């Protein structure tokens, strides 16, 4: 089987609907970040809400990783930590540290001048105390830091919640973490952001909001928790899952309706208190319904097979890592070629080059390490 065939056929049938959602997430993120340049009006319109693509990624990650771990608990009663961390290490770290190397070894590649200290990238703590105003280069790695911290903590949390009545203990654990996150996000807003509103100060408000509310892990767990909740339901609540499986479309379109509500709720001033407190849970619930619906054959999205979605979904991680560098590098060459800054061709060119760069990263970095991972995991299986 060729590499290209492996790339496009990598997804299992039951995940076909999720390919479309993962592709949607990275497209939204790309358009959000492209607003740093001159652009067509539609890019600005869509991109203003494109930041929610990260929230969709969080729900998808919470579901996929949560299901993987909870399935182990259900089948053998415990988590194979070594296997899990080998899998995550070989999946996440090679491409990530390649991009970190490029950002620090070749500063001219940076989309912005300032960058967070190297040690924060090396320890996946870059999302804490991140000043977007002075450390804007590779700032989008904040969400990857949250996911990596999640990968470390979730297996431990599940292990502590397993045993007798594990479903009930897990439910109360998730609920407790959710409520604590709600409380901390509200307190963060009151302490750090409210003075800007009290004095009607707009300058610097966005930077402070991002630093103390938007980036910290404890404020952004909503989507991950919703994803894990879905995984817990389909793993341990089989009767409920069977009943829900007939309502794939209803779940998906309920999520779309909630997304429309979230858009109305957040579009005017998402930095205000109530959008900050309730907007993220609303987004998580909306995307959770869409993900929940998309995994069932009763959902129309489950049966749509677009090679484009599969490719973009497979490359989404590499696209996420490299698209800002590609966008920055292409601006002057595209000026030289006479492609207008506000033309669709310019956006299309940057998108295509980001996909090509991601394909190269996938082929030269991700793919070899994933093959190595398969060998290591196979050897571990033989030992057991």
Image: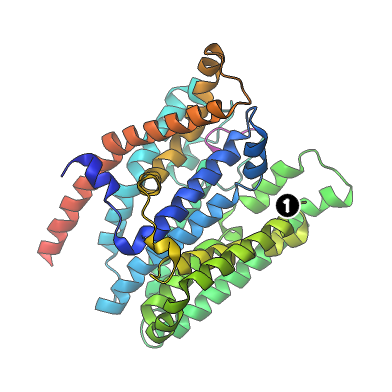
Q: Quadrant of the C terminus?
A: bottom left
Question: SS of the residue at dot 1?
Answer: loop
Give the magenta part as a residue range: 134-139
Residue position for label 1: 267
Q: Does residue 183 appear left or right of residue 312 in this picture?
A: right
- Identify which residue, 101 or 343, lies in the foreground: 343
Where is residue 193 drawn, in percent x and y? 77, 51
Give the quadrant of residue 135.
top right
**Residue at horizontal 51%, vertical 76%?**
173
Where is residue 271 drawn, in percent x and y? 74, 52
- Identify which residue, 291 or 154, lies in the foreground: 291
The answer to whether one can see residue 22 in this image is yes
Tell me: residue 301, above or below residue 309. below
Where is residue 382 drawn, in percent x and y? 10, 62
Residue 136 covered by magenta stretch: yes
Where is residue 326 drawn, in percent x and y? 47, 28
**Residue at horizontal 66%, vertical 53%?**
213
Q: Quadrant of the N terminus?
A: top left
**Residue at horizontal 40%, vertical 70%?**
296
Q: Which residue is the extreme one toward the left? A: 382
Q: Does residue 270 appear left or right of residue 198 in this picture?
A: left
Residue 371 covered by magenta stretch: no
């Amino acid at each position: 089987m060729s590499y290209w065939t492996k790339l496009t056929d990598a997804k299992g049938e039951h995940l076909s609907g999720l390919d479309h959602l993962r592709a949607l997430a990275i497209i939204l993120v790309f358009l959000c970040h492209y607003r740093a340049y001159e652009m067509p009006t539609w890019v600005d319109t869509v991109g203003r809400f494109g930041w929610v693509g990260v929230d969709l990624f969080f729900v998808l990650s919470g579901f996929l990783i949560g299901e993987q771990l909870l399935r182990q608990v259900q089948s053998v009663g415990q988590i194979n930590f070594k296997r899990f961390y080998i899998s995550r290490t070989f999946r996440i770290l090679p491409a990530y540290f390649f991009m970190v190397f490029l950002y620090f070894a070749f500063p001219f590649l940076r989309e912005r001048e300032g960058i967070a200290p190297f040690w924060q990238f090396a320890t996946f703590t870059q999302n804490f105390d991140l000043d977007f105003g002075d450390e804007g280069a590779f700032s989008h790695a904040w969400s990857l830091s949250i996911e990596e911290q999640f990968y470390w903590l979730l297996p431990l949390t599940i292990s502590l919640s397993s045993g007798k009545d594990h479903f009930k203990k897990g439910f109360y654990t998730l609920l407790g973490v959710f409520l604590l996150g709600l409380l901390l996000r509200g307190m963060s807003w009151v302490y750090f952001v409210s003075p800007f509103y009290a004095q009607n100060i707009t300058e610097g408000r966005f930077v402070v909001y991002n630093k103390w509310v938007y980036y910290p892990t404890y404020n952004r767990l909503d989507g991950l928790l919703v994803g894990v909740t879905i995984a817990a339901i389909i793993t341990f609540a089989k009767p409920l899952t069977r009943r829900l499986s007939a309502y794939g479309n209803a779940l998906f379109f309920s999520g779309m309706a909630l997304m429309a509500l979230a858009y109305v709720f957040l579009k005017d001033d998402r930095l205000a208190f109530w959008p900050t407190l309730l907007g993220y849970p609303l987004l998580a619930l909306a995307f959770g319904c869409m993900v929940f619906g998309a995994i069932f054959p009763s959902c129309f999205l489950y049966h749509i097979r677009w090679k484009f979605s599969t490719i973009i979904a497979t490359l989404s991680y590499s696209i996420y890592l490299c698209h800002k560098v590609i966008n920055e590098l292409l601006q002057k060459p595209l000026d030289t070629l006479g492609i207008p800054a506000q033309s669709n061709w310019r956006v299309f060119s940057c998108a295509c080059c980001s996909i090509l760069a991601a394909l190269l990263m996938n082929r030269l970095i991700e793919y070899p390490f994933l093959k190595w991972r398969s060998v290591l995991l196979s050897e571990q299986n033989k030992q057991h």
